[in-house]
Image (tube, rainbow, N blue to C red):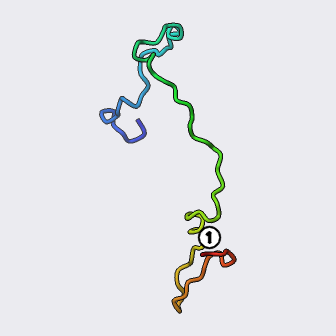
């Protein structure tokens, strides 16, 4: 009414359904069908623990030995100057 949208333009599929929804508790007691019995529950293979990489790992070495963009004179300064790099 006061929102500037005509009734003909309202979209009905954003409103809740007119039927009643429910849960059949009998579904808890019926055995699974023949296909569903073959499903296998896979455990959570992902670990939330991190492992320490060795200091000579290529990825860690790349991070430790990173350089900044060149200065005006064309020299590259390392971001971590105290690190020993190969």
Q: Position of residue 17 (x, y in %)?
A: 41, 22
Residue found at x 59% / y 68%: 61
Q: Is residue 7 above or below residue 85?
A: above
Q: Residue furthest left?
A: 8
Residue 76 or 59: which is nearer the viewer?
59
Q: Is residue 56 above or below residue 30?
A: below
Number of labels in the image equals 1
Nearest the eye: 73 or 82: 82
Label 1 sits on a secondary structure element that is helix
Locate the N terminus by quadrant. Answer: top left
Q: Residue at x 64, y 60 (%)?
A: 54
Q: Is residue 74 above or below residue 28?
A: below
Q: Position of residue 62 (x, y in %)?
A: 56, 69
Residue at (56, 37) in percent of width and height = 45
Q: Residue at x 44, y 25 (%)?
A: 16
Quickly name the residue at label 1: 64
Which image quarter is the C terminus in?
bottom right
- Residue that protrudes farthest toward the right in the picture: 82
Crowding at dot 1, Cα within 10 Å, few <14 / some 14-19 / many 20+, comes out as some
- Taking 25 as reference, is 64 above or below it? below
Location of residue 35 in the rendering, given as x and y in whole percent from the top left corner: 40, 17
Snapshot quadrant of residue 34: top left
């Amino acid at each position: 009414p006061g929102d500037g949208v005509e009734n003909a333009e309202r979209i009905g599929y954003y409103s809740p359904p007119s039927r009643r929804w429910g849960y059949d508790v009998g579904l808890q007691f019926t055995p699974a069908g023949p296909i569903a019995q073959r499903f296998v529950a896979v455990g959570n293979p992902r670990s939330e623990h991190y492992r320490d990489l060795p200091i000579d790992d290529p990825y860690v070495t790349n991070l430790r030995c990173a350089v900044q963009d060149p200065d005006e004179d064309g020299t590259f300064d390392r971001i971590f100057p105290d690190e020993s790099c190969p």
